[in-house]
């Protein structure tokens, strides 16, 4: 009889633990791999057919795309810079080039944002090849703006005519 009570207690304990774990997995909002994304699209907000030559001092029509999969609402900013091969950002450091424009937005989890933008393009030396850089930043409470390590760029030849 003692063996039957012990077996019953073990079966009951395993059943309770299994039920609690099952409920926790179902009810727990989980985002196993949180991430953000940024994309650069052409003037029609499509991938491809990007301009390769731009007149110095002109503006370029492009579209920016941002996606939030952090598992929470996020406050983001996209900053625009003109860089060279030596001043491109990396996955850990932002570009040291000055910020020329910025856009701020709030996105809920699993929400995206796409907008047309007018980008000023210039170069002090002509002709030259520059990178139009767009970096994604997120605002964290207590830390302020944090570079996400996400960025895109488009190389263009800047010409006088």
Image: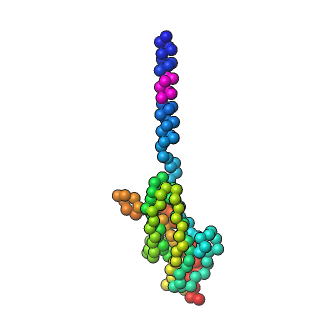
- Height in image: 100 above or below 28? below
State which region is magenta.
Answer: 10-16
Residue under the point 50% across and 32% down: 19
- Height in image: 34 above or below 90? above
Outermost residue to the left: 142
Front position in the image: 7 or 55: 7
- Is residue 78 visible to us here? yes
Q: Quadrant of the C terminus?
A: bottom right
| Percent of width and height locating residue 54 | 58, 82
Residue under the point 50% across and 14% down: 3
Outermost residue to the right: 49
- Height in image: 2 above or below 40? above
| Percent of width and height locating residue 12 | 49, 24
- Is residue 97 visible to us here? no
Outermost residue to the bottom: 161
Magenta region, main secondary structure: helix
What is the image's colouring? Answer: rainbow
Q: Is residue 91 magenta?
A: no
| Percent of width and height locating residue 147 | 44, 63
When asked about the image quadrant of residue 77, the answer is bottom left
- How many numbered dots are placed on residues in this image? 0
Front position in the image: 100 or 70: 70
Front position in the image: 83 or 62: 62
Residue under the point 60% across and 81% down: 53
Residue under the point 39% across and 59% down: 140
Q: Is residue 11 magenta?
A: yes
| Percent of width and height locating residue 20 | 47, 34
């Amino acid at each position: 009889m003692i063996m039957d009570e012990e077996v019953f207690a073990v079966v009951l304990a395993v059943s309770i633990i299994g039920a609690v774990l099952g409920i926790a997995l179902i009810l727990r909002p989980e985002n196993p791999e949180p991430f953000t994304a940024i994309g650069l699209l052409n003037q029609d907000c499509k991938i491809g057919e990007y301009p390769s030559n731009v007149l110095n001092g002109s503006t370029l029509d492009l579209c920016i795309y941002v996606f939030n999969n952090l598992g929470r609402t996020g406050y983001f900013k996209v900053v625009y810079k003109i860089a060279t091969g030596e001043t491109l950002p990396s996955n850990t450091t932002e570009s040291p080039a000055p910020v020329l424009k910025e856009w701020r937005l709030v996105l809920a989890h699993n929400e995206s944002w796409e907008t047309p933008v007018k980008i000023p393009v210039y170069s002090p030396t002509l002709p030259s090849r520059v990178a139009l850089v767009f970096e994604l930043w997120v605002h964290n409470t207590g830390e302020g703006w944090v570079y996400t390590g996400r960025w895109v760029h488009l190389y263009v030849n800047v010409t006088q005519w």
